[in-house]
Amino acid sequence: MSVWRSPLFLSGFLIIVSLFLGSIIYSHFVPNEKQPVMQIRFDEQKQPIDSAPLAPFKEMPFGTDRFGVSILHKVIDGAKYTLGFAFLIAFARLFFGTLLGLILSQLPKPVLRISSKLFESFYYAPATIVAYLLIYPVLQIFTWSVPKEQQTIFSMMILILIAVPTVMVTVANETSKFLENEFISSVKVLGGGRIHKLRKHVLPYLKPRLSILYSQQLIATLLLAAHLGILQVFIGGTDFVTLDPLENNTVPVAMINEWSSMIGANYYQIRGDRWIVFAPLAGFAVTILALNFMVEAMKRQYLAKGAYTKRSRKVRKVKAPLQVKKLSQEQFDRIMKTGTDN
Amino acid sequence: MYLLVLRRIVYFLMPIVGVFFIGALPYLFFSNVQGIEAVARLLESGALTNALFLNQDLGLFFEPYLDKIWDLLINLVTFSNVTFYEYQQEKLLFPTILKPYFYSIKLVLGAFFLAIASSIILALIIKILPDRIQKGIRFLFFSLESLPDIFIVVIIQYSMILYVRNTGNLLFPIVHSDQNPSYFLPIFCLSILPTLFLIRTLLFLLDDEDSKMYVEFARAKGIRYALVLYIHMLRNSLLSLFYYSKNVYWLLISTLFMVETIMAIPGITDFMLDNGPTTPDVITVSVLLMFVPFYLLFTLSSYILEYKLGRNDEEVA
């Protein structure tokens, strides 16, 4: 059974795809210039009764932020940035990690073991803090000595590089374990070279594992982005808006409606106007849940071990009913007479 | 034999050396780290409002990187104290870092033990439930595990606020203050994700145990399933649970950061974030402080398990 027929995988996949494509289509029809804005709410007598940020379920479905922009609009519009960004980063992580991992698996055994132990520390060090330490100076301290594009490229590179060692070691270990199989030595005997072994034997074996790893890296990227958002490091770029010139009240504002920066930029409002933070957080939760559904379905399919389901020991046999032969009267008579039908 | 011991020692030390590679990363990417440090210090003290003048190249600088790693290694092996900069004065790292460190370690250890205890109890309860309910609960827990850690912490904090608003009494302090240090809520928040992970793993191991001969034999003798579960299956799968303690540590550390940021706890990650930009060495020392005790624990337990069960780490993972 293909993984595409599992309802768990399909539901996760549909959620992700509809979020991503829905966001692109939505922002095609409702660009940011036409975004729903309501700064002041009036009652029937045209009396102002409320001002932004408006609470949810009154006029705007999820309320508005403090500039009066609908949160629902921001969340739908931001999905394509957050998801697209995560797709890109996770793909780059996997690409470089796999490449380096395959190379690493061809090196002598002690090198593989020592490097896998060395890079184990990347797994234990808090990734958020390391990423923050490297991205923060570029985005906030020497902002002027590096052009804007280079800043973005650099922060993306950091987000990629931070996970490459772990992916690399995982792939290398997986590959070298696979190469210990007995049929690999027959491949060698029959004249298969290194490249042949990698292309014809290792890659087909790795493919399902890589798709699991891809979804896991997507989850890790999303979490990392959310954490960095809380630390006021916005991936889409930061603007500063002065709310009250007299009180030196300047707040960082994200340049695009990306979810993690929405959380970070409005985090100080969580005690009062919590819906501004909860809506993008819920977006993250739904996305990660959908991705986990996909991971779970793929794990059950490819690795034959699921995370939450009980593995049943009984193999259900499907009893197909015997096909009934249609006989003509002539054939029937012949069978009754001779015992065979020809 | 000597070679074997030497190899073990090298493998043992490698992850610790790796931490130095992480801590010195700014030196790999920035040409002028001293400049960043100095400017960060001035920005912190308020003497500067921008850093227009700072010239900085981005790239890969292997030589200063390796130099820095070597310097730090020598520094720590000879137990010389690292200085860092806070509130416009140079301070020694070592007595200062201990206070946030002990706070964090209390939280992490508390969450670790809470997670182990609650996951064992919950897993055993789930395991004896009827099949249908069990399936539903497993799915529920699996879904809960997918929630991002920020979401969990924020929701718990907010539900505490709602409770206070409706009833008027505060169950637990939701934010840290020096007069009123908060322990229970951070530990609770920290332990949720590890608990869910451990429940899943333990159920997985127990399911594995289900198909073994001794369970069927005991059932055939007429012993109740619950009894076999509590006494034999639990004992057999608890040992294997230790192989997953590394993942638990990872979950704890990544959530610790979120809990400390949201609940304003002056713990080790908070210390790292405050002083990391001005002194990168702080990161190395703090990661080492958090990592090494747990690493020793894991290594020790994995050797004991290897001795007892005759399997080793690589085979299981």
Image (cartoon, coloured by chain):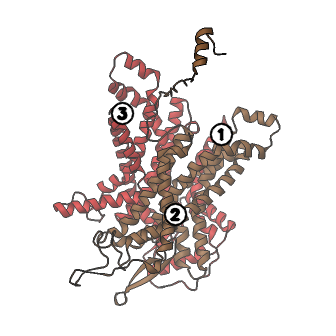
Chain colours: A brown, B red
Which of discs 3 and 2 lies nearer the camera? The answer is 2
Residue B115 x %, y %? 37, 45
Q: Disc 2 marks which residue?
A: A21
Badge 2 amino acid? Leu
Discs 1 and 3 lie in a common subunit? no
Q: Find numbered disc 2 in the image and state the secondary structure of the residue it sits on.
A: helix
| Tag in front: 1 or 3 | 3
**Element type where label 1 sits in the image:** helix
State the image coordinates of residue A170 (x, y, percent, origin top left): 61, 48
Contact flag, marks 1 and 3 (Cβ < 8 Å) = no
- At x 63%, y 48%, the residue is A171
Q: Which chain contains the residue that carries disc 2?
A: A
What's the distance in space between the residues labelled 3 and 2, CA to CA?
A: 39 Å
User: What amino acid type should be assigned to the residue bearing mark 3?
Assistant: Asp
Name the residue beneath numbered marker 1: A177
Q: Which mark is residue A227?
A: none
Residue B276, placed above or below residue A18: below
**What is the spatial separation of the Cα atoms under label 1 and label 2, in whole angstroms?**
39 Å
Q: Quadrant of residue A177?
A: top right
Taking the spot 23% from the left edge, 62% from the top edge, the residue there is: B162
> Mark 3 sits on what residue?
B131
Q: Is residue B73 above or below residue B116?
A: below
The percent coordinates of residue B311 (x first, y second) are: 56, 32
Which residue is painted at 38% across and 38% down in the image? B135
Q: Residue at the spot x=54%, y=40% of the render?
A: A301
Q: Tell me the element at label 3.
A: helix
Left or right of A221 on screen, residue A309:
left
